Amino acid sequence: MSSHYEAPIREPLVLGEKSYHDISVDVGAPVLGKANKSWWIVFTIALVAFLWGLGCIIYTVSTGIGVWGLNKTIGWAWDITNFVWWVGIGHAGTLISAVLLLFRQKWRMAVNRSAEAMTIFAVVQAGLFPIIHMGRPWLAYWVLPIPNQFGSLWVNFNSPLLWDVFAISTYLSVSLVFWWTGLLPDFAMIRDRTTSPFQKKIYGILSFGWSGRVKDWQRFEEVSLVLAGLATPLVLSVHTIVSFDFATSVVPGWHSTIYPPYFVAGAIFSGFAMVQTLLIIMRKVSNLEAYITILHIEYMNKVILLTGGIVTTAYIIEYFIAWYSGVPYENYAYLSFGAATGPYWWAFWALIICNLIVPLSLWVKKLRRNIVWTFIVALIINIGMWFERFDIIVIDLSKDRLTSTWAMFQPTFVDIGTFIGTIGFFFVLFLLYARTFPVIAQAEVKTILKSSGESFKKLRAVHGDDHSHVQNVEPYPADAGPSANVEDKNFDSSFNELDEETENNEVDYEAHKDKIDNLLSGIGTFDPATQTQDDLKKISGVGPVMEQKLHQLGIFTFEQVSRMTDREYDLLDEIISDFPGRAKRDDWAGQALILKNKN
């Protein structure tokens, strides 16, 4: 995927003169550094909202769900509306992670990690509402098919409500494993870069012993593909099963075969809108504009346009069926003339304006690439998709087949407070995640740096794809061998006679003296009196030029190279910037260990 160069006309996915080391520093900065003032302000607001919602939940459980605005006609209202809304928001993470991975879409790499985290946090919020709605949440385990002491008491496997339990728990489990697997190399990067012993210990445990060897990467790729294959059906199944809560009933407006694909498209529509909302904020707060670019925003907007078109088609079909059926009950469905002119007309038109009209502005390229407008549209879509779920549930239930049962729903302060509390809880989790976990998959972004990075694209634009960007190699000049690499000589006597072109291959020893000393302190020094130099060109990725530069640094043996870790790889990239990331990518340490054992 990353080995193929892109055409120069394509916009880069990584902006600026970024090296592999720069990516590690930029992605690790929010975790290793201190939180700024903006983070604390947003976190405080989210925490207050969460505590308010927690108080409402405690009040509801201790008093009963009668404190909600439900009545004998509308038994589902804000609680199930919020449940479906949160599940829909959590849909985009699996799509970005699994489906776009299988389709080899490079642009997913800067946004997938946060989308996966958003999925998990959103599903957690969604699961709260059915549990609270039970009235006795401490008996929530009764929905599980487990042996019990009540004899014939057993779950109803024919109920789509039970299907929800299995679908969402499976979705959460697979998403969690997928998310954690992708984080392993990022945890290892934080482990190797932190100076805190406590953080080093914690991230060492979280990284499961990741060492960056070729075998680690091979297993990582294999497991990622397997999990993507397992997760892809979930993209379709989870919200399909959620739609069965309505489609399998006989309530007018609910009993519809169009619901499964309609709900799936709507979930992706709202999920991508929430990802946009979070990423636009995060790219600014965490200084990640070089990795979450305008191009990423535009690609996301194109997916929103596609799924928004599918949702719009479903709206038109729903409206047409309600009219064409000639059934008077259908005229009060959530998408009908009755809904547009009835007591819930404001909710109907909020749905149409937010989900149908406003997103059409994204067809204009200037608006599609405008950060502020994209953020506004994403917020409006989130609001519109909430109104869609509200209309489906409340409008359809408010007018049943018997006029004597018609009723209106009025939310109470507990309804509103619980919903706001889940929003606060979601942002508390997301903000804590942004401070403790890398918000960008740095290991995956590095794989596209050479093909989609701005600096490398400029090099190819000048020299072409086949240009090696390596200078001509002169024979190794240190006739005295490794003994020439001693203090106070620094190759002056051996290299002064070379022409100017060869001088470009020299390492600036004085400029990097501290880093070289730091590097050698980790891998050891070479003693020509007791040791024999090895042919470092036997290591894949080390040519004559690189071997010459390694000799200048004082690296002559397989033993030294085999001791390299991520720390030494990063130092080597800083000192020799011609081939950033090659040592780690080609696993020089692993190769040197094998060669050392053969000697």
Image (cartoon, rainbow, N blue to C red):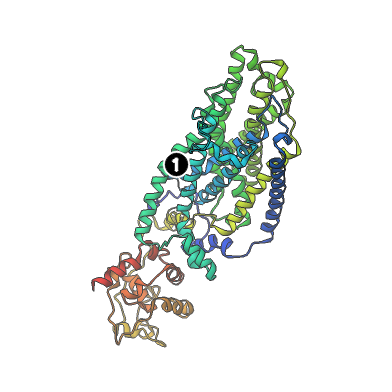
Viewer-proximal residue, 191 or 18?
A: 191
110 up-or-down from 312: above or below: below
Q: Residue at x 35, y 82 (%)?
A: 526
Asked whether residue 474 appears in the rendered view, the answer is yes
Does residue 470 appear left or right of residue 294 in this picture? left
Give the secondary structure at mark 1: helix
Q: Quadrant of the C terminus?
A: bottom left
Q: Position of residue 142 (x, y in %)?
A: 55, 37
Q: Dividing the picture into quarters, in which one does residue 60 lie?
A: top right
Disc 1 crowd rating (10 Å Cα; few below 14, some 14-19, many 20+) is: many
Asked if one can make out residue 103 in the rendered structure from this viewpoint, the answer is: no
Count the labels in the image. 1
Question: Residue 295, percent across and down?
Answer: 54, 47
Of residues 487 and 145, the one drawn nearer to the viewer in this rendering? 145
Residue 541 shown left or right of residue 335 in the figure: left
Q: In x, y percent, where is residue 353?
A: 67, 31
Q: Position of residue 551 (x, y in %)?
A: 35, 77
Q: Indicate whether 148 appears above or below 19.
A: above
Q: In the image as oriented, which residue stretches furthest toward the top?
A: 326
507, above or below 176, in the image = below
Is residue 77 positioned above or below 19 on the image? above
| Quarter where residue 137 is shown | top right
- Which is more toward the observer, 199 or 115? 199
Looking at this view, name the residue that lies furthest to the left. Answer: 599
Would you identify the image quadrant in which residue 101 lies?
Answer: top left
- What's the residue type where badge 1 is placed? Ala
The residue that appears at 55% across and 51% down in the rendered structure is: 292
In-image side of 291 versus 428 (left or right): left
Residue corresponding to mark 1: 231
